[in-house]
Image (tube, grey):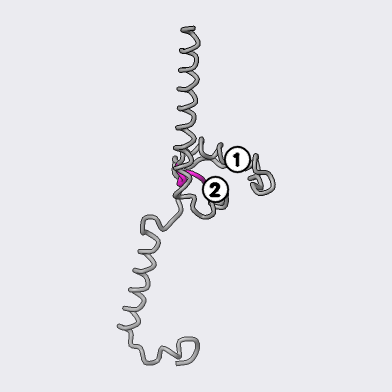
Amino acid sequence: MVGPLRHLHGINGRTLFCILLVGSLILVMIILLPGSKPTLTSKSVPSLQPRPQPNYLEHPQEGQAYMHTLLVQSGGDFDRLNAGNQAFVDGVLGGHARRYFPLMYREMTSKARGGAAASSTHERSSDTN
């Protein structure tokens, strides 16, 4: 044999067919497996672009405000953030965003409820005086 297939001289047609068949099946399985392709879901939070993500080290107040916005928009669900916002949150939380982002949301909402309850209790006690 001459040309690029000269190294296949010892392989018969049946063996070559089996190799090509197995390779094709593997390729088809990779393409068709669920989760192998990135998909956009309706759960995704829209990107907050063109607003750039703040440098939370140089401007911590801006970083905190941006994090609050992401918490509110996602409902504390890290998976609802787009890839850029996930990277931002993961950077702020030292690589532990999946664990702490939902906890931050719960803390934020409990403080909001606690503050509203405290102010309504204060109003009721001042009405009786």
Residue at 53% of width from left, 49% of height from top?
86
Residue at 52% of width from left, 55% of height from top?
95
Where is residue 90? Give x, y as percent: 53, 51
Q: CA distance from mark 1 to mark 2?
A: 10 Å
Q: Secondary structure at mark 2?
A: helix
In the displayed structure, 56 sits above or below 73; it is below
Three-letter residue code for mark 1: Gln
Question: On residue 89, which mark appears?
Answer: 2
Q: Nearer the viewer, residue 74 or 42?
A: 74
Q: Secondary structure at mark 1?
A: helix
Magenta residue span: 77-82
Q: Which residue is mark 1?
A: 64
Residue at 40% of width from left, 61% of height from top?
31
Where is residue 24? Give x, y as percent: 37, 70
The verdict on residue 65 being magenta is: no
Q: Nearer the viewer, residue 75 or 48?
A: 75
The quadrant the N terminus occupies is bottom left
